[in-house]
Amino acid sequence: MSVTPKVAVLGAGIAGLSAAFELTRSGVDVVVIDPADRAGGKLRTSPLAGIDLDESADMFLARLAWGIDLCRDLGLEATLIHPAIGSALVVHEGQLRRLPEGLVLGVPSDVEAVRASGLLSDAGLARMAEDLARPEGPPEENLEVDRSVGELVRSRLGDEVFEMLVDPLLSGVNAGRADDLSAKLGAAQLFAAAQRDQSLMRGARAQLGALPSSGERAPVFAALPGGMGTLIAALVDAIGTDHFRLGETATDLVEQPDGRLAVTIGATSETVDAVVVATPAPVSANLLRAHVASVGAQLQTLRYASVAIISLAFERAAVPGLLDASGFLVPRRAGLLLTACSWSSSKFPHLGADGLVRLRASVGRSDDTRFVDLEDRDLILAVRAELASLMGIEAEPVAVRVNRWPDALPQYQPGHEKRIALIEADLADHLPRVVLAGASLRGLGIPACIDSGRRAARTLIKQLVPTAS
Ligand SMILES: Cc1cc2nc3c(=O)[nH]c(=O)nc-3n(C[C@H](O)[C@H](O)[C@H](O)COP(=O)(O)OP(=O)(O)OC[C@H]3O[C@@H](n4cnc5c(N)ncnc54)[C@H](O)[C@@H]3O)c2cc1C
């Protein structure tokens, strides 16, 4: 091993950058390789009508410590902001209706609030209320076994709650079908609630009850005024720009006789002591297949959904209504191209400081790829037609942009976590100095990706830096 150990980080998304940051802090030399000409992967911010607006993720869960911790380590904590509005709307019978209060990932805790929302039929309400008649206490079945969110929620609360409340919310996060989504990874709060009580609603209530009263409650989401690009810039700064090989693709790993690894990068290579593979699963599969066939084969099975964000800026006068929500969700049954629309300048008022209304409309799900075949111009027209019908916006936008994210969001099927644990164990057996990180593992949200990167780094630090605890 060289005197100062050196690690190659493949992929400069938030997971790879988090790994590189952790390694750098421990005195490990790093080289970060990414085919893109800038760091950040899926996180990108650019101006829309003169104000920086995220092109993909615009906030992260504050409840999971990993995002906040990284911001603290980078000196960004004091600049964090939180959405000004929590409540959201949902499309129901062609109109925007307010979601009831007290939802835990779409699962109601308050029957009356759901009744008052008018979102469920009488039969749907009655079916939902049956859940509360179940005996108190944990169920007999072994809920340690992962299952789909659909299986969990439909069986306890009926199809309407699932289709109107739970699926729209969760598919707004991962652009998939909650019927296929691992409850353990994709809806951990519901998974925990289901283990606590035979009634999912009581389980949800208990979770809300465990929180401080709403006045003292910590914010659910955090963001940065300059967008997620600020986080990326701070990470790149802390790692050091001379540690990046951007615009270059890692194509192979070659084990050296001395135990080191050579990363092939075009006609060149980097010889390092260890590697963090923080690339999307199909790329990781290609890099690792020749070394551990089972790892390549398993990673290859992960499916991704493609999405696009259409960001629009309008004069305030062109947008009717109070805009007193964070945006709206769209249930599948509405049959729209839109899957959600974030009212960015309502959520974060500085994004409307110039008097413009900024919206970010999302399209695309794992089972709805219609947008992929539309040219940008037609996609914008289709989205504007739906916004006209739902929000009454007829005017031309002042600015508009389309950001397409092909194969961007991993779809965790039930049992995913177990599969990942086996993949990691196989990799550790065969290539102990190669560690995986990123959204393909245990969560696609920014905090989970940060955690995966820092964890991967710590695994290697233990092996490479003898003094590390
Ligand atoms: C539209 C959208 C909205 C989202 N909204 C939110 C949100 O509001 N909140 C939230 O928490 N999360 C959100 N997410 C999810 C989150 O942004 C991503 O899951 C996360 O950024 C993924 O980070 P990553 O580092 O794992 O992967 P990536 O960002 O995909 O990084 C992987 C990197 O690997 C590189 N690479 C590819 N091939 C190679 C190779 N051969 N060699 C080297 N490098 C390679 C790629 O160029 C890329 O830069 C959103 C995602 C999308 C797409």
Image (cartoon, grey):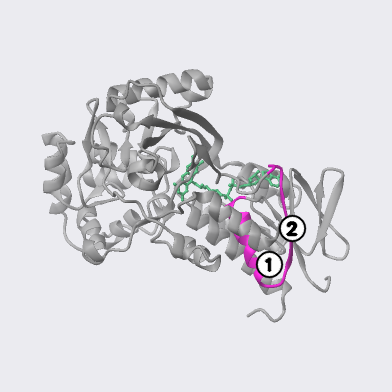
Work out whether residue 356 or residue 330 is closer to the camera in this orientation and state it: 356
In the rendering, at what x and y percent does residue 188 appear?
Answer: 38, 56
Q: Is residue 183 left or right of residue 275?
A: left
Residue at (84, 51) in percent of width and height: 269
Sequence-first tag of 1 and 2: 1
Q: Amino acid at mark 1?
A: Thr
List the residue tagged with mark 1.
24
Q: Is residue 295 left or right of residue 154?
A: right
Q: Secondary structure at mark 1?
A: helix
In the rendering, at what x and y percent does residue 175 appear?
Answer: 44, 38
- Tell me if residue 260 comes above or below residue 120 in the rendering: below
Q: Are marks 1 and 2 in contact (CB under 8 Å)?
A: yes
Q: Is residue 368 left or right of residue 218?
A: right
Is residue 25 on the magenta stretch?
yes
- Tell me if residue 100 comes above or below residue 62 in the rendering: above
In the rendering, at what x and y percent does residue 129 appear?
Answer: 14, 47
Give the class, few, some or many, for how many residues have Cα within 10 Å of label 2's Cα (few <14, many ≥20). Answer: some
Residue at (42, 48) in percent of width and height: 182
Magenta stretch bounds: 13-37
Q: Secondary structure at mark 2?
A: helix
Give the class, few, some or many, for how many residues have Cα within 10 Å of label 1's Cα (few <14, many ≥20). Answer: some
For label 1, being within 8 Å of ligand 1 is answered no
- Tell me if residue 58 comes above or below residue 430 in the rendering: above
Q: Is residue 277 visible in the rendered structure shown here?
A: yes
**Image mark for residue 243:** 2
Residue at (15, 40) in percent of width and height: 117
Q: Count every numbered label the image shows and give the total.
A: 2
Work out whether residue 185 or residue 15 is closer to the camera in this orientation and state it: 15
Q: How far apart are labels 1 and 2 at the CA level?
A: 10 Å
